[in-house]
Amino acid sequence: MTEAPLAIYIDMAVPDRDRLVKLVTDYGGIANPSYSSVSFMLGQNLFKQYSHKKGKIVLDARWVDECIRIGCLQDRHTNWAGCKVTGTE
């Protein structure tokens, strides 16, 4: 069974956004241009608006690099590799 590609929204304000978009697509994900249809969003400035919405996870942009460094997708079981935005950063 093949899993669907992971769709991620990367906020326009994220430093090095173009590099992250390329990494996401190179590793089989989808860099979605809209945040409305995705569960995963990269960008700390999205925290206040989306952190309490059901089905939305706001992650620091370093999450992409951490997943690649570790060699697998980091999710809730691995505490998002310490990259989940909590508002205390």
Image (cartoon, rainbow, N blue to C red):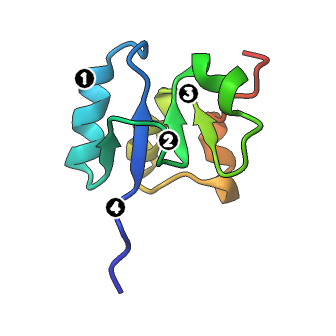
Q: Left or right: 75 with respect to 19?
A: right
Query: Circle 1 is placed at which residue position?
Result: 18
**Between marks 1 and 2, how big is the CA–CA gap?**
20 Å
Label 1 crowd bin: few (<14), some (14–19), many (20+), radius 10 Å: few
**Residue assigned mark 4:** 5
Distance from disc 2 to disc 4, alpha carbons, whole Å, reads 17 Å
- Indicate left or right for 83 with 17 as reference: right
Of the numbered discs 1 and 2, the one sitting upstream in the chain is 1
Q: Amino acid at mark 2?
A: Ser
| Location of residue 67 (image quadrant) | top left
Q: Residue shown at 40%/56% (left/top)? A: 6
Residue 69 in the image: above or below residue 3: above
Percent across and percent down for residue 3 are 38, 74
Compare marks 2 and 3 and give the one earlier in the sequence. Answer: 2
Q: Position of residue 38 (x, y in %)?
A: 48, 48
Mark earlier in primary sequence (3, 4)? 4
Judged from the image, the secondary structure of the residue bearing numbered disc 2 is: loop
Q: CA distance from mark 2 to mark 3?
A: 18 Å
Residue receiving disc 2: 36
Measured in 3D between alpha carbons, the distance from the residue under mark 3 to the one under mark 4, in whole angstroms, is 20 Å
Query: Would you place residue 2 above or below residue 88 in this image?
Result: below
Quadrant of the image occupied by residue 14 = top left
* Mark 2 burial class by Cα count in 10 Å: few <14, some 14-19, many 20+: few
Q: Nearer the viewer, mark 2 or mark 4?
A: 2
Q: CA distance from mark 1 to mark 3?
A: 15 Å
Quadrant of image for the N terminus:
bottom left
In this picture, residue 18 sits left or right of residue 7 = left
The residue pinned by badge 3 equals 60
